[in-house]
Structure formats: C-alpha cells, structure tokens
Image (tube, rainbow, N blue to C red):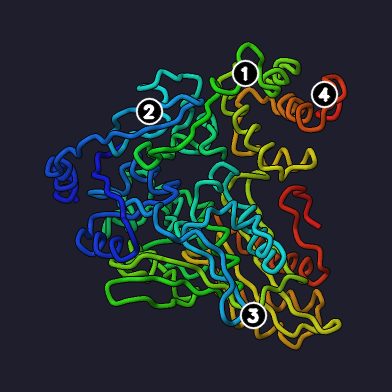
Amino acid sequence: MAQRSAAARKRPEKIPTPAKMAITLHVNGVERKLSVAPWTTLLDALRLYLDLTGTKKGCDHGQCGACTVLLDGRRINSCMTLAIMKDGARVTTIEGLAQGNALHPLQQAFMDHDALQCGYCTPGQICSAAGLIAEGRARTADEIRELMSGNICRCGAYPKILAAIEQVMFGKSAQKAGEAGR
Amino acid sequence: MINFAYTRASDIGDAVRQIAADPAAKFIAGGTNLIDLMKENVTRPSRVIDITHLPLNRIEETENGGLRIGALVPNSDLAYHPQIAARYPLLASALLAGASAQLRNMASTGGNLLQRTRCLYFYDTATPCNKREPGSGCSAIGGINRMHAILGTSEHCIATHPSDMCVALAALAAQVLATGTNGERGIPFADFHRLPGDAPHIDTNLRADEIITAIELPRKGFANHYTYLKIRDRLSYAFALVSVAAGLELEGDTIKEARLALGGVAHKPWRNRDAEARLAGAPATRESFQHAAEIVLREARGFGHNDFKIELARRAVVRALTQAARGTPQSQADKRIA
C-alpha cells in the first residue's frame, strides 16, 4: 500500500499542466472575456477573476446552495460547474438582480421580513428563489419549502425566508405572510 | 481540485474515439458528482471530455409505444416532462425525491446512472476502500455503517448505490442504450449495475469505450397504481436509508402484475422478481404485501449500525405496496406518509 501511495503521489507530475482557454460569459448583462484553466469552477471565476464576490463559497461541494446563480435563467450550484464548459452562457448573480437603485422584489422582501441573520447564505437563497419563481412549480408553502431545500441556512431563518418568498409569489403583505410562515 | 485537461466531443463517434484512445479520461455532462470526486481527489482523470454539445437531449416516442430519453436530458426537465408526468409518474416522483432543485437542473439522465456511492470511506482518501483502491480493504465493515447495504453485499464492499431515479427505472424495466467502438447495444436495466463481489471498483457493465446515449422506457408505466416512498434522516435533500418503487396493475382487488424495487439497501437498485411473482395473482391485501416483503428481505444481513434497515425496509415495502394499491402515491412535497 505504501508503494501504491507513492505511485499515486508521483502521478500528477507526469501530467503536463493544461493550457488555459479563453471563454466569454454574459454576466449580469455584460459581456466578460476571461481565460480559465479546465478546473476553474464558475464560482471561482466569478469571485476571483470578475470580482463578483456576492456569490458565496459555502461548502464547495454542492450541498449548501450558497453559490447558487442563474445560468441561462436556471438556478444551479456554481461550485459544481466548470467555467470552461459554459462558454457563451448567460449568468445572473445577486449583483445583477436589482434594476438600478430599485431592489429586486425578493431583495426587498428579504429585508421586509428580516429573512436572514448572518447573511452568508442570502445571495444564494435569493438567486434560488428567483429560479424557483421562474420555474413556476411551487404553489403551496410545502412546495416552496421542498423546492428551496437545496439552500441551507445555518442561522435557521427558514420561516422568514419562506414568508419573504410567499410575499413575492402570492403578493401577501409582510404581516400576513409572516403569520403564514409561523 | 486536481489538474486535468479538457476537450469537447463534436459528435457521438468523436466521443467514442476520444474515450477509446485515452482510458484515463472521463466524460463530463452535469458534473454534479464527478467534479466533487475530483475535488476530493477520489477520481483523477487525465482529462475530461465535455459531451454537453452532443444531440442527446430529446424525449421521443419509440416504435413499441414507449419513450426514449436522451442521455443529456436534465433530471428536472425529465421529471416535469408532460409525457413522463402522465405516463410514468413513478419516474417523475423518484426524480423529485432526489437531490435539490439546483442539482436536478444540472444533472443529466445518463450521468445519474453513473453516480458513485456516497460511502464516507470511499470519499475519505485517508482510509482503506476496495472501491477506491482495490485490495486495500473495506473500512465500512466493522466501521460506521449506518447508511450501508443489507442485500447483495460481499466481504469486500457494503456500499449502496445513491440514485433515486435508478430505483424507478429498475422497477419500470427500462433499457440503457450505449454506443461504443463496436456499435450500439441495449442493456436491460437489471444488468447495468453490478453487485460488488470481488471487484467493487467496477460499478457497472458499461464498457470502457462506451457512452450512454439514451434510456428507453417500455410502454407500461403503472401510472394508476404506483408510489415512490423514500425514508431518510431529514425530510428533504438527503440520500435514502431505504426507498421503495412500487407499481401495480390491478383487476378489481386482484394483482395482475407487480413491480418492486428498493433503493438505499444494495450496491445496485434492488429489484426482486420472486416477490413480484408472489404478488401476481394474489389479492391486494396487507397479508400479500407482507409476504412480498418477507421474500425481499429473506437474505438481508446487517452490519451493526444498519441492522435497523432490515425491519425498516420490510415495513417500507408493505407501506409502498399499500400506497400503490390505494392509488395514493407518496407526495414529494407534503412528507406525511399516507
């Protein structure tokens, strides 16, 4: 086993470092050209190369949802996506949801309901909720909970997050939606 | 993450040529499992071959009244496809019981079949694992094995297959279409995944030069009497401890045909044809369902922490067959078990 491990350790040295590749991403409506290695995730490309640090790295294993962005309009985990595979794609991050100074309705609703404590999961929660609404599959509180289950909130703000999403989906007032969330 | 090279496949022939020429390469589509395995240093391909530009994203009718699902159809598109929802709700339900909305948007149909076990020792490169490093031993036997298999195990591996979708495909008797250097072939679903035996590092019977192009569903979808019942440690977004896919065809109160497959209990989706045969012709009663459950679990064996799965699976089979017979399938949103 020691021999095998030694062989395994040596192996990467034999692989020449692959060249970076030029790709174009349409991020929040702006065309961005960048050069990425094959193993650069979309999450790292956004944060490290495009300075869009609103998208968070939580678990980096597709389990927490903090890295959720919209790719061609669909919510995905950017940590489990290779940037090199998404040449030409449209990406929407938390930075791209507001229209000028007008917050996206979900951003406003999260504020109205105090739908966060530490806030680290919030960009992913909001992008995921935007994807959820665009999908149009959730009609009840149970369905919202189930279809938002890919976004973990360690602070446990789930009732408020649900209330904020209900406000946007069903046009409930802040007070009424809050009651439904309890 | 490890370093690797990247190429794109221009068509199916090109994909086959590329994989045949480089056995250390891996195809990538959704990447939801492979990228994680590369981050964990468990899978170390020399390069990944991007197949997402191949024309394998259609769902179409087959000549014998079934459906052919392209290997690149995302799990979410498949689950919500009108034909799947209407004719194969068992498959739709199993898909929606798995992963999260984000992952289902990314994950491909073909890739779902090739998911690797989530056994913690397989992921932990500091521990022996026969699946990751053949001959090094199995850490789960005698280790923490609450999530592990109770059926079809070997002394070399007690890992489980993680997919929900595949449990439904096993029950529906789907067929996997694959193309390799020698052309296209169909693989019955029951023959696609393997038991661990003495080669647990080999998960499937797909050949090294083959690419999955489609899944074919036969005409019969058991749309009136089905359920996918998934029991797990939290109500959503967790792998199954035990899951049951059941489909019944009833004539009055008599079972004409039954399909029964379990997830979370074995190295492959566990379809039991003896239990199905026992149900055929029997009345749709609790007693019949209990007999079937006894047959399924007859040779089950626990490894300590997972002993509870034997009784859990027995009860889940009875409950799932009851749900199917009553026409009250398990909701994947409201988790109360009907």
For label 3, the residue is B275
- Locate residue B228 relative to residue B137 in the image: left or right: right
Q: Position of residue A10 (x, y in %)?
A: 13, 43
For label 4, the residue is A178
Q: Chain of mark 1?
A: A
Residue occupying the point 53% across, 51% down: B146
Q: Amino acid at mark 4?
A: Gly
Q: Chain of mark 3?
A: B
Q: Quadrant of residue B80?
A: bottom right
Earlier residue among tags 2 and 1 = 2
Q: Chain of mark 2?
A: A
Q: Nearer the viewer, residue A126 or A119?
A: A126
Q: Position of residue B180 (x, y in %)?
A: 31, 71
For label 1, the residue is A99
For label 2, the residue is A45
Label 2 neighbourhood size at 10 Å, few (<14), some (14-19), many (20+)? many
Q: Position of residue A141 (x, y in %)?
A: 78, 38
- Secondary element under disc 1, as helix, strand or loop, is loop
Residue occupying the point 31% across, 55% down: B9
Q: Chain of mark 4?
A: A
Give the alpha-carbon distance from disc 2 to disc 1, as whole Å: 24 Å
**Mark in the foreground, 3 or 4:** 4
- Locate residue B246 relative to residue B129 in the image: left or right: right
**Mark in the foreground, 1 or 4:** 1
Q: Position of residue B316 (x, y in %)?
A: 69, 63
Earlier residue among tags 1 and 4 = 1
